Amino acid sequence: MGAGSKNRYARAMNPWIPFLTGLTLVASLSPLLTFARLWQIKEWRLDRLREHMRHEGCLRAIIGLPRTILFITYAVVLVSNRVGIFLLIAATLTAFVVLTIIQFALKKQHMPVWTGKAAIVVGMALAINAIAATTLQTTATLHLFLPLLPLLQPIVLAGTLALFWPVDTGMKQRIMRRAAALRAAHPELTVIGITGSAGKTTTKELLAHILQPIGAKATPVHMNTEIGVARWMISLLTYTAEPPPLLIVEMGAYRTGEIDALCRITKPSIGVVTFVGKQHVALFGSQEALCKAKGELVRALPAHGHAFLNADSAMCAKLANDAACTVVTVGTGGNADREAFDIEETINGIRFRDHETVYEVPLHGTHNVTNILLAIAVARHLGLQPKHIAQRLHTAQAPTHTFCIEERRGVTVLDDTHNASPTSAEAAIAWAEQQQADKRTLLLSGLIELGAERSSVYMQLGSLAANVFQRVIFVNPNGKEDFEKGYGAPIEQWSKRIPPVAGGSILACVGRMNAGTIEQMLPPA
């Protein structure tokens, strides 16, 4: 394009700047919201997002193949110089807008949960898009890049978060200081911290159910970060006339120091470590580093405190060496202070004996026995009698989408889709193997943040599943090839045309997936 053409374009553009800016904002909305939702799921953490992008390769899903094709078409036509520039830019942006409208109309647009942070960040990103679109249109040559802006939303959102980071960090520090001060003002509180690579939510919910009659309060389901726990404590200790005698706090971590920060806020005197496995090992660098991070809870306990550890997990049991307080171990394989005997899985859940008491708990999967034992051990330490504990456990419920079993259209469905770890996948395979059914199907989504362990974990799971499942279906293709090596046969890739399972069969669903995916695998109503 010559200088004269550029000048004529610039003069012609001025009246249309608001129009094209509006088109650009709407065209950018879908990829912006999609990426915001993904990053929010990763708790706005760069380390978790980076690990996800490294293994999931999700940029195509964020931007969309049609948008990519449209931009390539735009570039080809632009180079050919056969269409007026203004018309070409407007037509391309309009096509992007149409795609956005279609996604919303079909209810396929991923949306962030509209928390305060999400609203601020998305609003700031839209403002940056508006400024960028206006600037590009008023600068010679750069206006040619206007249709590229919708495809650059991951960069725009990353820049927005970088700008918001100082404010966000300051607000978080203020909230955590307030929570710590409120905790210090109530030294009579007993705080129980629970962490682990797997099982911490189940253990927390079981313990909360047992201790509910004596006024214990627990963090809401799957709330386990510093800021989430801090806000919960502020709400509980500020607006409750009389603070509860016991607080049960689930503690999650994705890097060293985060459980330590939670302990500085909550000051636990009782600590529970459920399991140390390979979940999130990519973020820590090694399983040893992950174990050390989980051990921050044990090391934070005072000398008069008590630590409760799962002796069936070798790395978890090692944390006893870090404790300055009394340690109680539980297990199913001997050499534990509290041990389960006569373990069996019934149609209604798990049944086992601990000392002279028989416990019947409506949870499935024998891997949950140690979680139940940990809850029993803490309750016994707090003075509750075995009879009372057994009565409370008999009415317990599993957290939603956490190893839940139900009959749907003649199919026995195992729903373990809130999250997934190698341990929970192994437990699902072991459970399915014990079920009486001619046909068993495994519907598996991705296991996240496994790092260098990724290939070996999938191969091992494939080997375990080989003699259990007649069908294996991957919702996410990542890890499929490694799983096939262990499985020893081709496995299926989920699509909307995949045949459903037959009535009377087992359908084990493991890993994050939406309800529609499972629904499609069931026989017609």
Image (tube, rainbow, N blue to C red):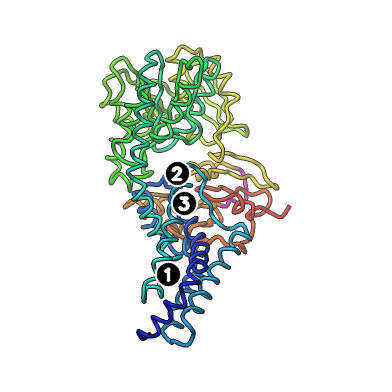
Query: Which element is circle 3 on?
Result: helix
Query: Where is residue 20 drawn, in percent x and y?
Result: 50, 69
Task: Residue under label 1, please give it.
Answer: 148
* 439 magenta-colored: yes
Residue 111 versus residue 493: which sits nearer the camera? 111
Q: On the picture, is 358 further left or further right than 167? A: right
Residue appearing at x 49%, y 42% in the figure: 115
Query: Which element is circle 1 on?
Result: helix
Query: Where is residue 307 drawn, in percent x and y?
Result: 35, 22
How many numbered callouts? Answer: 3
Q: Distance between the residues labelled 2 and 1?
A: 27 Å
Task: Residue under label 3, please give it.
Answer: 123
- The relative height of residue 129 versus residue 304 in the rendered view (above or below) is below
Residue appearing at x 58%, y 43% in the figure: 414
Query: Where is residue 91 drawn, in percent x and y?
Result: 53, 75
Q: Count residues near mark 3 (Cα–Cα under 10 Å), then give few for <14, some for 14-19, many for 20+.
A: few
Q: Which of marks 2 and 1 is nearer the N terminus?
A: 2
Task: Residue under label 2, please give it.
Answer: 117
Residue type indicated by callout 1? Leu
Q: Which of marks 3 and 1 is nearer the N terminus?
A: 3
The magenta region covers 436-441
Does residue 40 appear in this view?
Answer: yes
Q: Count residues near mark 1 (Cα–Cα under 10 Å), then give few for <14, some for 14-19, many for 20+.
A: many
Residue appearing at x 46%, y 56% in the figure: 126
Residue type indicated by callout 2? Lys
Mark in front: 3 vs 1: 3
Residue type indicated by callout 3? Gly
